[in-house]
Image (cartoon, rainbow, N blue to C red):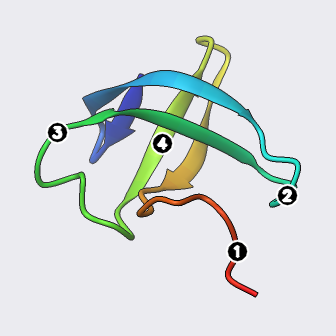
Amino acid sequence: ELYADGRRVGQVTSGTLSPSLKVPVGLGYVEVPFDRPGTKIEVDLRGLRRASARVVEPPLYRHI
């Protein structure tokens, strides 16, 4: 699940470690207005803890 401002605002659909970026990445559905690029959110990690994240525009790779 995805959280912002202390409330649930979305759902993760998939996640993995990006071999090219060398960081975890994920995809999911996020409510408006939390869907804007740069928005800071938190990702619930299997109920164990929450990790900081931010909304970005695809594609998920660094421009060289």
**Mark 4 element type:** strand
Residue reaching furthest to the left:
32
- If you read the primary sequence from the N terminus, does the residue marked by circle 1 or circle 2 appear first? 2
SS of the residue at dot 1?
A: loop
Mark 3 lies on a secondary structure that is: loop
Residue in the image at 16% along x and 39% along y = 31
Front one among 12 and 8: 12
Q: Mark 2 highlights which residue?
A: 20
Q: Is residue 57 positioned above or below 27 on the image?
A: below
Judging by the rendered image, the residue that carries numbered circle 3 is 31
Q: Mark 1 to mark 2: distance in Å?
A: 8 Å
Residue 33 screen position, x and y as percent: 12, 54
- The earlier-in-sequence mark between 1 and 3 is 3
Of the two numbered discs 3 and 4 in the rendering, the one whose residue sits closer to the viewer: 3
- Inter-mark Cα distance, 1 to 3: 26 Å
Specify the quadrant of the image occupied by residue 16.
Answer: top right
Residue at image coords 24%, 52%:
35
Of labels 1 and 4, earlier in sequence is 4
Asked whether 20 or 54 is in front, the reply is 20
Q: Do tag 2 and tag 3 residues touch (Cβ < 8 Å)?
A: no
In terms of sequence position, does the residue under pointer 2 or pointer 3 come before the other? 2
Q: Which residue is mark 1?
A: 62
Asked whether the beta carbons under mark 2 and mark 4 sit within 8 Å of each other, the answer is no
Label 4 near label 3: C-beta < 8 Å? no
Q: Nearer the viewer, mark 2 or mark 4?
A: 2
Q: Is residue 20 left or right of residue 1?
A: right
Rounded to the nearest angstrom, the CA distance separating label 2 from label 3 is 28 Å
Q: How far apart in space, not on screen, are marks 3 and 4 (Cα)?
A: 13 Å
Label drawn at residue 42: 4
- Crowdedness near tag 2: few (<14), some (14–19) or many (≥20) residues, C-alpha within 10 Å: few
